[in-house]
Image (cartoon, rainbow, N blue to C red):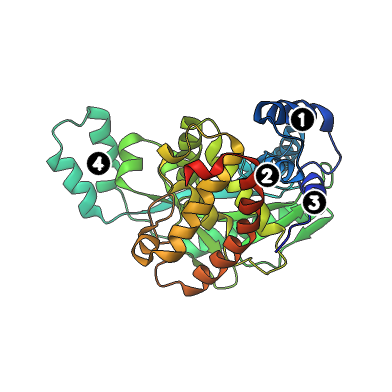
Amino acid sequence: MQKNYADLVQRAKNRSNPDSIRETELFSKSFNEDFKGLGIPYSEVFEYVKRAMQGVESEYTERTIEAGNKIKEHLKRNNSSLDYKFQGSVMCNTHIKGHSDIDLVQITNSFYSHEPIVKFNEKFTSSSYLTLGQKQNLLSVINGTPYKDDVRDNLRKIRLEAETVLTSTYKYVDITKSKSIEVNPTNPDRLVDVVTASWYKNVDSVLDNDVDKNGIQIYDKEKNLRLPVDFPFLKIQLLNGKDKSVNGRLKKMIRFLKTIKADSEYNLKEISSFDISSICYNIPTWKYSDKPYYELVIVLYSELKKIIEDENYRNSIRSIDNTEYIFKDKNEKLRLLRLIFNELLPIYQDLSPQTSFTKFL
């Protein structure tokens, strides 16, 4: 299907830089240099690809984080004993909307869950190279005192207190959602989702005393329970680390797939940013570590084609934090990936005649 690149370019502009902040500075010079180097005339398909891969203008992201920090400070003044951390695509710089929302997690320190204690004991007794500090870290869990109160009551109290603080401070607050409180502080005008959770510790996080390796269990107010463990801060750490090693190319691919998903006429909501990030993270870095932005399209084309055609390979793909399979026993996600591939295919075909892409096939 032929793409209307003029329309797609405008959508990308409106999405990532809605107020056209430093539009000329951001793109004109770099586009001229790109096309001069390629020895080809300007092409809208190249502009769309570049814009789809480009990060959101930093001023928008700074405003988003500013909104999150304002909410955090209000909550912190009410309860300074909690840990407050941001999660999500803004913290990875893989968001594609200038006016992105941000997730703020308030985490109780009254208790935590952990991996089976046998794993901590095994590490303590079988590893001769542990430092004294590492041994003490492991013993803090092994000899930990069980929490005597009801964890659900603790989390419910934290959630309800946050609702009270936020509704008394801000005009636009939605407390009806089961997993988060949605706040719009208006200045800056961003949505902030406040999530309540408890910590989940594993051997690696305790051994290294690294909070970002901890998992969290989000509290569901409607069901009055904790959800299965998730590792949002570890995902950020791993993704940022790998992206740095390839000079930003990993995040360019993630943003590109998220953009063509957003521009599709199909409803692709069920294939998430988490899924897309995991797909790109799984690609061996040698395949793209030296590629210019336009050649990343062929890398993605080849990867999605392989995922669709090779069931064994598809079923081997795991999440960034290695806790779950992305496609195994999930036929609906495969169907949606095929639709994303169908959006990618004409872009790949339109780029190919204008470059020397074919030599990479």
Residue identified by numbered label 3: 11
Query: Disc 4 residue type?
Result: Leu
Front-most of residues 79 and 57? 57
In front: label 2 or label 4: 2
Residue 81 placement: quadrant = top right
Residue at 64% x, 60% y is 343
Asked which quadrant contains residue 47, the reply is top right
- Which mark sits nearer the N-terminus, 3 or 1? 3
- In this view, the mark in front (4 or 3): 3
- Measuring from the top left, give residue 312's x and y in whole percent: 33, 64
Residue 302 in percent (x, y) is at 48, 52
Label 4–label 3 contact, CB within 8 A: no
Residue marked by disc 1: 26
Name the residue nearer the viewer: 101 or 218: 101
Q: Give me the C-alpha separation between circle 4 and circle 1.
A: 53 Å
Identify the mark nearer the N-term, 4 or 1: 1
Earlier residue among tags 2 and 1: 1
Based on the displayed image, in which of its 4 quarters is residue 137 positioned? top left
Residue 158, how many percent across, how many down? 59, 56
- Against 246, residue 139 (above or below) is below
Give the side of residue 19 with respect to residue 256, left or right.
right
Q: Residues within 10 Å of mark 3 (few under 14, many from 20)?
A: some
Q: CA distance from mark 2 to mark 4?
A: 52 Å
Q: Give the SS element for disc 1.
A: helix
Q: Position of residue 164 (x, y in %)?
A: 72, 57
Amino acid type at image mark 3: Arg
> Disc 2 marks which amino acid?
Val
* Label ID, residue 139: 4
> On the image, numbered disc 2 is attached to which residue?
49
Q: Nearer the viewer, mark 4 or mark 1?
A: 1
Give whichever of 234, 114 is nearer the camera.
Answer: 234
